[in-house]
Image (spheres, rainbow, N blue to C red):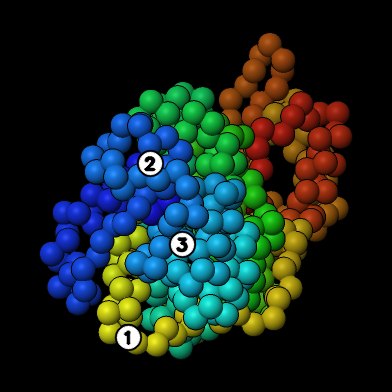
Amino acid sequence: MLGMGVVGSGVAEALFQKSDSLTNQIGANVDLKLILVRDKSKSRSFDVSPSLFTDNFDEIIERDDVDIVVEVMGGEHPALEFILAALKAGKHVVTANKEVMAKHGPEIFDIARERDVRVLFEASVAGGTPVVSPLMRDLVANEVNGIKAIINGTTNYMLTRMSTENIDYETVLKEAQELGYAEPDPTNDVEGIDAAYKLAILSTLGFRAQVKDDDVFCEGITGLSAKDFQYADELGYTIKLLAVSSRTNGEVQARVHPALVEKDQMLAKVDGVLNAIEIETDLTGRVLFHGPGAGSMPTSSAIVADIINIGRNIAGNAAFLDPVRLSETIKVQSISDLQTKYYLRLEAKDEPGVLAQIGSALAENNISISSFIQKGFDPKHGTAELVIMTHRATERSVQIAVKDIMDLGVVAGIGNMIRVAE
């Protein structure tokens, strides 16, 4: 095993405590041979024999009695190099590494295929909630048309708190960090990067064509305010960080961003640190996977399940089937081509003709107003806050219209622009 942090300790604990059960399920013993760590003297949350620790990766791949390498280090480097070296040495690999799989999945699959070994990565997307295996196995008879997901527990916890407690972003971020949900540097979570990695993996598997992490449009939650949640609620919505990909006419669009979700939708009811992935296919329609997306034990569940999967093949001397077959590279649409409804919050002078000017700027870009609400008045500056919901429009047109509105002398600023989930 590579790494012995929170997840690695959970995997080690599961392997030792469930030893008899694993032997019965696999038909062979599962022995943890070596654990790669930086500091062999460091104390761990789960105690194992010091003789299992090594700081030399070569010692692991050179051993003939090591069949499976479990990577739980995280990060791109040196995890990628270790995974590739293990595969080339004829070792099967189980990994929870979303960044490596999002950026280098096809390369890893090719080497595994050449060496006739398997790489499984259930834990890389939704932790203890199975979705990777169903996409590779149970849904292969389907054509996946769309994926809509909440796949970052940290941001979902934060947005849930902002929605229910009317607190601002900075306050809820500090709370999430104190509870251990958010890292000291929360960038990957709050800027949507973590969710983009996971969406790239899901999209690649679902559409059977490589969708890279940098194909995913990414916008985080740092610009959201308590006001946005208040107004969204009044309009019948809640706000979620959604990861969405869809396939239309042979092209894929993949995006991660905050979105207004109607309260009666299934994803609107996914709160706290839970994850949910809704997959729409041609044969089954919509299928929802819902459960814990992080944490030592849920993630360990997925990793140990992958170990069992590979172990059964080894014990039964069965052929290893290639679980991931990708077609040619698919064309990725720009976010500019998105068509949806939009929420705009802006501050403007409280005087006659203001709405007419704003409406004209929208109309010139083929955007019509669905509803308009004036919220509050600032007597000091003589301004009012306006909330506008549009009918369906293209992202390209809305972005141009927002710039045009900003140039109006009667507009003091754009508070936010949020897409509406459809």
Query: Measuring 78% from the left and 48% from the top, which residue is drawn there?
Result: 399
- Measured from the top left, where is residue 404 in percent x and y? 85, 42
User: Residue 299 appears in which quarter of the rendering?
Assistant: bottom left
How packed mark 3 is, by other alpha carbons closer than 10 Å (few <14, some 14-19, many 20 or more), is few
Reading the image, the residue beneath label 1 is: 317
User: Residue 359 appears in which quarter of the rendering?
Assistant: top right
Q: Is residue 339 left or right of residue 10?
A: right
Q: Is residue 320 left or right of residue 18?
A: right
Q: Residue furthest top?
A: 380
Label 1: element kind:
loop
Q: Is residue 185 above or below residue 4?
A: above
The mark found on residue 62 in the picture is 3
Reading the image, the residue beneath label 2 is: 5
- Measured from the top left, where is residue 183 in percent x and y? 47, 33
- Measured from the top left, where is residue 409 in percent x and y? 86, 28
**Residue type, mark 3 in image:** Glu
Q: Marks 3 and 2, how far apart in space? A: 24 Å
Of residues 73 and 340, the one nearer the viewer is: 73
Query: Measuring 83% from the left and 54% from the top, which residue is drawn there?
Result: 365
Q: Is residue 249 above or below residue 158?
A: below
